[in-house]
Image: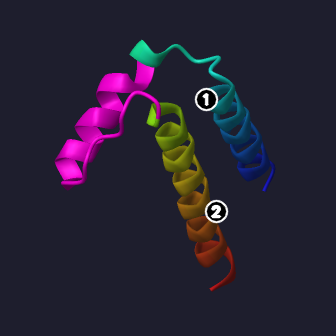
Amino acid sequence: MSGLTIFNAVMFLLIAAALAGAIPRWIYDGFLRGLHMTIGISTPTDQQLRRALALWLVSVVAIVDVLVFVIQYL
């Protein structure tokens, strides 16, 4: 369980850094636009990019946490 706690802590630090603008846009801009185009949804504007990154990271945390819960307790 400590691995999951460390994962969550690191991911929430990344989310906070993304929302604060501490991560340069060139690092994640192409990835997010490619991800949105791949699954067929509209790409975020430049103003929405940081929030979109934070939302994707929150989604990853939720998915991983639920999968770990299902594997452990069901």
CA gap, disc 1 to disc 2? 21 Å
Magenta span contains residue 72 = no
Question: What residue is at 25 percent from the left and 48 percent from the top?
Answer: 42
In the rendered view, tell whether residue 29 sits above or below residue 58.
above
**Left of 33 or right of it: where is 58?**
right
Q: Residues within 10 Å of mark 2 (few under 14, many from 20)?
A: some
Question: What residue is at 46 percent from the left and 17 percent from the top?
Answer: 25
Q: Amino acid at mark 1?
A: Ala
Question: What residue is at 46 percent from the left and 30 percent from the top?
Answer: 47
Residue carrying label 2 = 65
**Left of 30 or right of it: where is 22?**
right
Q: Quadrant of the N terminus?
A: bottom right
Q: Amino acid at mark 2?
A: Asp
Q: Secondary structure at mark 1?
A: helix
Q: Nearer the viewer, residue 40 or 57?
A: 40
Q: Secondary structure at mark 2?
A: helix
The dot on residue 5 is none
Where residue 49 appears, x then y in whole percent?
Answer: 45, 33
Q: Nearer the viewer, residue 45 or 9?
A: 45
Q: Residues within 10 Å of mark 1 (few under 14, many from 20)?
A: many
Q: Main secondary structure of the magenta part?
A: helix
Please identify, in this view, whether the residue under mark 1 or under mark 2 is nearer the observer.
1
In the rendered view, tell whether residue 57 sits above or below residue 33.
below
Q: Which residues are magenta?
A: 27-47
Residue carrying label 1 = 18
In the rendered view, tell whether residue 60 sits above or below residue 46.
below
**Left of 62 or right of it: where is 26?**
left
Magenta span contains residue 43 = yes
Residue 65 figure quarter: bottom right
In terms of sequence position, does the residue under pointer 1 or pointer 2 come before the other? 1
Q: Quadrant of the C terminus?
A: bottom right
